[in-house]
Image (cartoon, helix red, strand yellow):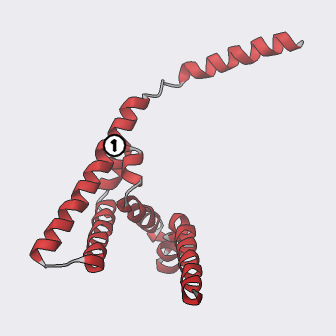
Amino acid sequence: MTGKNRQNYNKNYIAYVNSFDPPTQHFKNCFRAFIVGGFVCCIGQFLRYFFESVFSLSGDELSGTVSIALIFLGTLLTGLGVYDRIGRNAGAGSIVPITGFANSVASPAIEFKTEGLVYGMAAKMFIVAGPIIVFGVLAGTIVGIVYLFL
């Protein structure tokens, strides 16, 4: 095959492959991600106001409580199978907030529970989240040591 024939063959093949691939709807996907991510943030803000007014929490206690509540909700919805349906429709809007991190920890644990508590749930739980946790702990330790010496 000559160079020009090869180019035409490649273009024809790419056109053939693209004929089976539906066009991506970027605006629609971005809009859904924005709406769902914003809704998760609105739930977090509601929880913040709720804990602030009902339990008179403030500062770090309030932030920690809201984070724990969002992680609990994300894990609960994952366990019930609702978070996967939300993720299918929302895309990145469901994985960016803290609830997405809870989902990434809980999903493998639920999926591999048949392999046992240690080799299934405990080991597979940190497949996705493990590197993030290790990096966070390592970065926090380094910052703490630097802060100690300054």
Q: Quadrant of the N terminus?
A: top right
Find residue 90 and report its horizontal and vertical position in percent: 35, 43
Q: What residue would you read off at disc 1?
A: 34
Q: Residue furthest right?
A: 2
Q: Secondary structure at mark 1?
A: helix
Q: Amino acid at mark 1?
A: Phe
Above or below residue 73? Residue 85 is: above
The one of 40 and 59 positioned closer to us in this rendering: 59
Left of 107 or right of it: where is 128? right
Above or below residue 19? Residue 65 is: below
Find residue 93 and report its horizontal and vertical position in percent: 37, 48
Which of the 4 image quadrants contains residue 59? bottom left
Find residue 83 and report its horizontal and vertical position in percent: 33, 54
Q: Residue furthest bottom?
A: 148
Q: Quadrant of the C terminus?
A: bottom right
Residue 89 appears in the figure: no
Residue 147 appears in the figure: yes
Q: Residues within 10 Å of mark 1 (few under 14, many from 20)?
A: some
Which of the 4 image quadrants contains residue 148? bottom right
Above or below residue 100? Residue 145 is: below
Above or below residue 22? Residue 5 is: above
Left of 1 or right of it: where is 102? left
The one of 83 and 41 positioned closer to us in this rendering: 41
At horizontal 22% and vertical 77% (from top left) the residue drawn is 58
